[in-house]
C-alpha cells in the first residue's frame, strides 16, 4: 500500500534515477481524499523515523543527497502539480524539519547556466521544488525578475540582464537574514549561456562554511549523472566512508 512507503534507505524517497518524486506523486493521485491525507501522514512518519535513526554524519550526508536529487529530478521526466508538491513537502519537508531540530542548516548554492528558452522553466520550477521542501530560495535572477515586476516591467528574460546587479545585492541581503535566523536556503544563480557572470559573487552565500551545524554545498556542474558538487560538512561531523 502507498500508505506504508517502505523504503530501505532515506535517500530512496528522492532518488532521481528511479524518478522517486514523480512515482510517489503518481501513487498519491490514485487515492481518495481521505486516503491521500492518511498516506501523506504515513509518508512523513516514515521519513521522520528514518531520519531519527541516523547519526549526525549520516543525517548530513542524507541532506546533501536529498538536495542534489531534488535538483536533478527536474531534468528527467518531471512534472509539477499538487501531488508532486505534497509528496516533496511530506518527505523532504519533514526531513528538513528533523534536520533543523538536530541543529543543522543546509546552504545549497547552484551556479549553472541555461539557454534563453530553458531559463524561464528553471527559474519557475527549481524554486517551487525547494520551497515545497521548506527551504528559502533566492538568487540574482529571481530577485531581478521581482525588481522588474515592482517597476511594472514585463518579466521578459531577454530584458533581465540590466537588473542582475541589483538582484544580486538583494539576494545577498536575503541570505544574510537566513544566516541571522539559521534558515536553510538555496542560492540559485542561473546565467544565460551567453551572459557574462563576472559580476556575480558567492562570498555571502558561501560565508558560513566551516561554522557549527552548517552544511554548504556548491554545484557548478550540470545536474546530470556523473557530475559532482563540492560539499563542506560542519566541524566535528564526518561523512560516512
Image (spheres, rainbow, N blue to C red):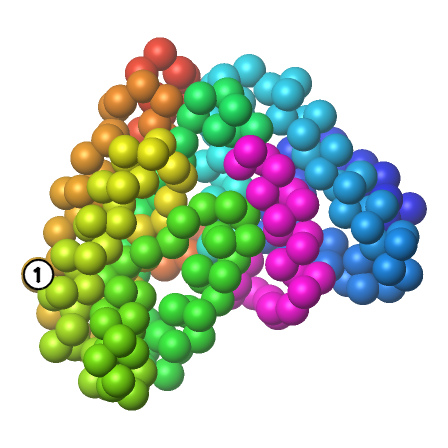
Horizontal arrangement in the rendering, residue 7 relative to residue 201 (left or right): right
- Above or below residue 39? Residue 73 is below
Question: How far across and down, in percent of the image, does residue 114 sit?
Answer: 32, 72
Characterize the local packing of mark 1: few (<14), some (14-19) or many (20 or more) Cα atoms within 10 angstroms: few
**Image position, residue 184 (x, y; %):** 40, 39
Q: Is residue 79 above or below residue 94?
A: below
The percent position of residue 235, horizontal first and vertical second, equals 31, 16
| Residue identified by numbered label 1 | 199
Query: In which image quadrant can residue 228 be found?
Result: top left
- The image position of residue 39, as x and y in percent, is 83, 47
Front-most of residues 103 and 12:
103
Visible residue check, residue 219: no
Residue sitting at 60 percent across and 68 percent down?
80
Look at 23% across and 41% down and name the residue there: 176
Q: Main secondary structure of the magenta part?
A: helix
Between 230 and 143, the residue placed more toward the observer is: 143
Q: Secondary structure at mark 1?
A: loop
Asked if residue 94 is among those painted magenta in the image, a careful observer would answer yes
- The answer to whether 162 is drawn above or below residue 54 in the figure is below
Identify the residue at horizontal 43%, vertical 26% (top origin): 104
219 left or right, relative to 202:
right
| Residue stretch in magenta | 73-97
Q: Quadrant of residue 183?
A: top left
Q: Which corner quadrant of the image does residue 119 belong to?
A: bottom left
Amino acid at each position: 500500500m502507498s500508505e506504508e512507503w517502505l523504503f530501505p534507505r532515506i535517500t530512496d524517497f528522492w532518488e532521481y534515477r528511479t524518478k522517486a518524486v514523480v512515482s510517489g506523486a503518481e501513487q498519491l493521485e490514485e487515492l481518495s481524499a481521505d486516503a491521500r491525507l492518511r498516506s501523506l501522514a504515513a509518508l512523513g512518519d516514515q521519513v521522520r523515523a528514518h531520519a531519527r535513526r541516523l547519526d549526525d554524519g549520516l543525517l548530513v550526508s542524507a541532506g546533501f543527497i536529498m538536495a542534489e536529487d531534488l535538483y536533478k529530478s527536474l531534468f528527467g521526466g518531471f512534472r509539477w502539480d499538487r501531488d508532486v508538491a505534497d509528496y516533496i513537502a511530506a518527505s523532504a519537508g519533514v526531513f528538513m524539519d528533523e534536520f533543523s531540530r538536530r541543529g543543522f542548516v543546509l546552504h545549497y548554492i547552484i551556479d549553472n547556466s541555461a539557454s534563453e528558452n530553458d531559463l524561464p522553466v528553471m527559474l519557475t520550477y527549481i524554486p517551487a521544488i525547494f520551497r515545497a521542501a521548506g527551504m528559502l530560495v533566492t538568487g540574482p535572477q529571481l530577485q531581478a525578475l521581482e525588481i522588474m515586476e515592482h517597476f511594472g516591467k514585463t518579466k521578459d528574460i531577454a530584458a533581465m540582464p540590466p537588473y542582475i546587479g541589483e538582484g544580486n545585492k538583494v539576494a545577498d541581503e536575503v541570505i544574510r537574514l537566513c544566516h541571522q535566523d539559521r534558515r536553510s536556503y538555496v542560492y540559485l544563480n542561473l546565467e544565460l549561456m551567453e551572459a557574462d557572470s563576472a559580476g556575480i559573487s558567492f562570498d555571502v552565500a558561501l560565508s558560513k562554511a566551516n561554522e557549527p551545524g552548517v552544511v554548504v554545498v556548491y554545484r557548478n556542474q550540470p545536474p546530470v549523472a556523473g557530475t559532482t558538487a563540492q560539499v563542506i560538512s560542519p566541524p566535528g561531523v564526518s561523512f560516512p566512508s
